[in-house]
Image (cartoon, grey):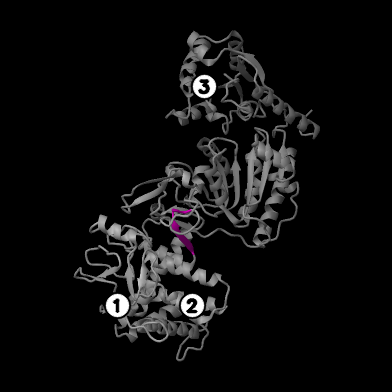
């Protein structure tokens, strides 16, 4: 439509003239989007009137007359009346940058966002000492002119007389000159510019550079300056493309973006240009919940745009960056401070072409993955769901904002990792991005070699706290769920493993991050042996597509736990002995060559219990570990390498660690910290190998609890379903 064409041409003209300060560039882009989004063919007059309200437009086309209504104060007869807030700021902060103004110190002020290497200016002016003043522009000698703006030619333009049409003479100049620029752009864009030497296939970018050189030549500045300007523009344009490519699918704070683009020249300028082209979006990290500026607080209060947390997680302190009482988010503080004056860069989403769905998978297609009948049946259902979802999303027929989800409900040791291989392979063949996320770092580290072995030709990136691949991009990404806060609409297949595990379970911040990282063209897969009750309810009612895998890959039944009456761990440590039945069972496990998981509820009990077992069992290869143990990773490696026979631990190892021949002892199984899901997961450490499918599991406690009974029934039910479907070997 006509309005959109003129807006696009005007946007190009603004870019051709000079690099916009980041705050003005952001406001220009928002205004263009707003005008175009009205869907009305209002003609050139409405567009020019809207653009004429932007300060930087007047500077670019050569007049210093500012005609807009400011965001913090009112403009009256060409002069700005400061708001009460600014008047108070002016009294309190003598010599500092005031509301909406940016000095050379690099601080971000109201109404402007600013990169570290870019100085924001109101209408492009800044005094020589780097201080800016409210409602006025500084000349080079430091004197402020109240209510006046400095023109491009350096002369001060006073308020003009109002004409009969209600506009001052300077306003008429604004409209006339901008109209001429728009018309020139339109004529040459459509090929009817008089004297234009347009080459066949010449792009708008090439024409832009030619116009810039011609404009500089007409102003008498010489060929050398024109060539320099063109070279600078090409360099900046290339930098903007590189920045947009690197930031695609990312959600980074300004410091993180600079770390990602380390070594690039003029990062701030590149981000500005990429924002104007629509290659990425810039916003404040903390904004008003109902939209608009945070200082003009709405009903919803403040909201963190990175983690989605609301006013309940906002704290306000005097900020060293902006000098004001600045709101920051405490919910995602561990990932870097998201604050009101901080810039959040959101990359463009990762999309797929509208590829037709593949034909139904055959047995031959699964032969390379070596799946069991139970695994193959569930994987076929999941794969069909993923392919149809991506096809419908690419074709624009998907309904709803949240990505369609699928639950893969598989028992512990069922081989869930192997079951997702066909899904990952299908999406990567389409050129899509795949994410495999899990709440725990230990599980990420265990998955890493298995994924790399299954997909040797794919670029695999592993992300966790302290990861060396923090800023790398790959076709397959393994990550802890906290790392998802740094992504925005990035992945076409999102697999959340162990979604019922801490810290993901019941954490709205991580749930928000897991949803926001999904591309508009994406499918989401949940994996769990003990899904939350709400998901189980949705699956039973047919509201959540799902597939159940009731048997392990080696087609043997799950070990059913035995109940042992034992005193509490605290009592055993005080008496310095363990019950005879428990000692007999542990010696039996050691004599058959098994390694032992011994689970306790409290971190402080791991080392004392390990010392007690070393003394009683006469076995030196016994250690204790927990989440607070700095040597935890080393002990787990030693346990996997069979250097340790017994490992006393907490629920930190209830998932993700596989030992071929192992037995499980859960002490204080009647404690309130061990629920049904935890007991099932810990019991699942036994019998996982085809060489030793019948491991032993013991629940030790003073009494039998509802959680213990429910866990035993859960395991027995899965064995019945597997047997009835013929998934168990006779």
Name the residue nearer the viewer: 629 or 310: 310
The image shows residue 362 at horizontal and vertical percentages of 75, 49
**Total marks placed:** 3
Magenta residue check for 283: yes
Dot 2: what SS?
Answer: helix
Compare marks 3 and 2 and give the one earlier in the sequence.
2
The answer to the question of whether label 1 and label 3 lie on touching residues, with beta carbons closer than 8 A, is no
Quadrant showing the N terminus:
bottom right
Q: Please tell me which residue lies in front, 725 or 8.
A: 8
Q: Residue lying farthest bottom?
A: 194
The quarter of the displayed image where residue 539 is located: top right
Secondary structure beneath dot 1 equals loop
Where 548 sits versus 232, above or below? above
Residue in the picture at 27% in, 67% down: 126
The residue at the point 58 percent across, 55 percent down is 519
Residue at (44% x, 61% y) in the render: 243
Circle number at residue 47: 2
* Vertical comparison of 369 with 502: above or below: below
Q: For mark 1, what is the residue? A: 151
Q: Is residue 446 above or below residue 33?
A: above
Alpha-carbon distance for marks 2 and 1?
A: 23 Å
In the picture of the structure, the residue carrying the numbered disc 3 is 648
Q: Are marks 2 and 1 in contact (CB under 8 Å)?
A: no
Q: Is 117 left, or right, of 509 in this rendering? A: left
Residue 700, x across and y down, in percent: 61, 17
Q: Nearer the viewer, mark 3 or mark 2?
A: 2
In the rendered image, residue 474, in percent from the top left (x then y), is placed at: 52, 52
């Amino acid at each position: 439509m006509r309005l959109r064409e003129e807006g696009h041409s005007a946007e190009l003209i603004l870019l051709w003239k000079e690099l916009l300060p980041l705050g003005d560039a952001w406001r220009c882009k928002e205004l263009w989007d707003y005008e175009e989004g009205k869907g009305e063919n209002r003609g050139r007059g409405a567009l020019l009137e809207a653009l004429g309200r932007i300060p930087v437009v007047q500077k670019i086309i050569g007049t210093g007359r500012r005609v807009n209504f400011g965001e913090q104060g009112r403009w009256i007869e060409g002069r700005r009346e400061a708001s009460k807030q600014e008047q108070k700021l002016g009294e309190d902060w003598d010599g500092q940058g005031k509301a909406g103004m940016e000095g050379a110190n690099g601080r971000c002020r109201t109404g402007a966002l600013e990169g570290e290497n870019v100085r924001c200016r109101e209408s492009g002016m800044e005094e020589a000492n780097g201080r800016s003043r409210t409602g006025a522009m500084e000349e080079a000698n430091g004197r402020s002119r109240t209510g006046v703006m400095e023109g491009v030619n350096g002369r001060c333009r006073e308020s003009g007389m109002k004409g009969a049409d209600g506009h001052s003479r300077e306003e008429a100049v604004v409209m006339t000159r901008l109209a001429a620029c728009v018309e020139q752009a339109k004529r040459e864009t459509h090929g009817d510019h008089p004297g234009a030497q347009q080459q066949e296939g010449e792009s708008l970018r090439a024409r832009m550079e030619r116009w810039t050189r011609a404009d500089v030549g007409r102003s008498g500045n010489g060929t050398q300056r024109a060539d320099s300007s063109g070279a600078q523009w090409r360099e900046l344009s290339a930098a903007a493309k590189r920045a947009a490519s690197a930031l695609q699918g990312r959600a980074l704070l300004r410091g993180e973006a600079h770390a990602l683009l380390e070594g690039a020249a003029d990062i701030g300028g590149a981000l500005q240009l990429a924002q104007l082209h629509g290659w990425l979006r810039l916003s404040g990290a903390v904004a008003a919940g109902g939209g608009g500026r945070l200082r003009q607080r709405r009903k919803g209060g403040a909201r963190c745009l990175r983690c989605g947390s609301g006013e309940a997680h906002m704290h306000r302190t005097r900020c060293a960056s902006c000098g004001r009482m600045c709101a920051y988010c405490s919910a995602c503080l561990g990932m870097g401070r998201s604050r009101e004056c901080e810039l959040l860069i959101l990359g463009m989403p990762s999309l797929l072409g509208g590829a037709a769905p593949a034909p139904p998978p055959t047995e031959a297609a699964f032969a390379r993955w070596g799946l069991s009948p139970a695994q193959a049946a569930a994987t076929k259902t999941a794969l069909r769901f993923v392919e149809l979802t991506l096809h419908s999303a690419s074709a624009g027929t998907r309904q709803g904002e949240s990505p369609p989800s699928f639950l893969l409900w598989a028992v512990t040791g069922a081989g869930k990792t192997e079951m997702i291989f066909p899904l990952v392979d299908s999406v990567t063949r389409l050129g899509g991005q795949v994410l495999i996320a899990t709440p725990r770092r230990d599980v990420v580290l265990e998955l890493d070699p298995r994924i790399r072995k299954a997909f040797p030709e794919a670029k695999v990136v592993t992300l966790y706290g302290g990861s060396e691949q923090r800023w790398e991009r790959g076709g397959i990404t393994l990550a802890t769920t906290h790392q998802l806060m740094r992504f925005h609409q990035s992945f076409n297949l999102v697999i959340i493993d162990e979604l019922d595990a801490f810290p993901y379970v019941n954490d709205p911040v991580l749930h928000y991050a897991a949803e926001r990282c999904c591309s508009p063209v994406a499918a989401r897969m949940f994996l769990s042996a003990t899904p939350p009750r709400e998901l189980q309810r949705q699956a039973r009612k047919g509201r959540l597509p799902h597939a159940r895998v009731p048997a392990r890959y080696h087609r043997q039944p799950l070990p059913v736990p035995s109940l042992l009456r034992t005193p509490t761990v605290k009592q055993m440590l005080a008496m310095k002995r363990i019950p005879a039945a428990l000692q007999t069972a542990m010696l039996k496990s050691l004599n058959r060559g098994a390694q032992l998981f011994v689970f306790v509820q409290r971190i402080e009990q791991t080392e004392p219990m390990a010392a007690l077992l070393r003394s009683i069992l006469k076995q030196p290869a016994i250690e204790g570990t927990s989440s607070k143990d700095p040597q935890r990773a080393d002990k787990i490696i030693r346990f996997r390498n069979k250097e340790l026979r017994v490992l006393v631990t907490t629920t930190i190892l209830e998932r993700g660690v596989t030992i071929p021949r192992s037995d499980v002892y859960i002490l204080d199984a009647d404690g309130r910290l061990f629920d049904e899901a935890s007991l099932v997961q810990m019991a699942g450490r036994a019998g996982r190998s085809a060489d030793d499918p019948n491991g032993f599991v013991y629940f030790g406690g003073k009494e039998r609890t509802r959680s213990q009974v429910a866990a035993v029934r859960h395991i027995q039910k899965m064995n019945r379903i597997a047997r009835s479907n013929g998934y168990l070997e006779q």
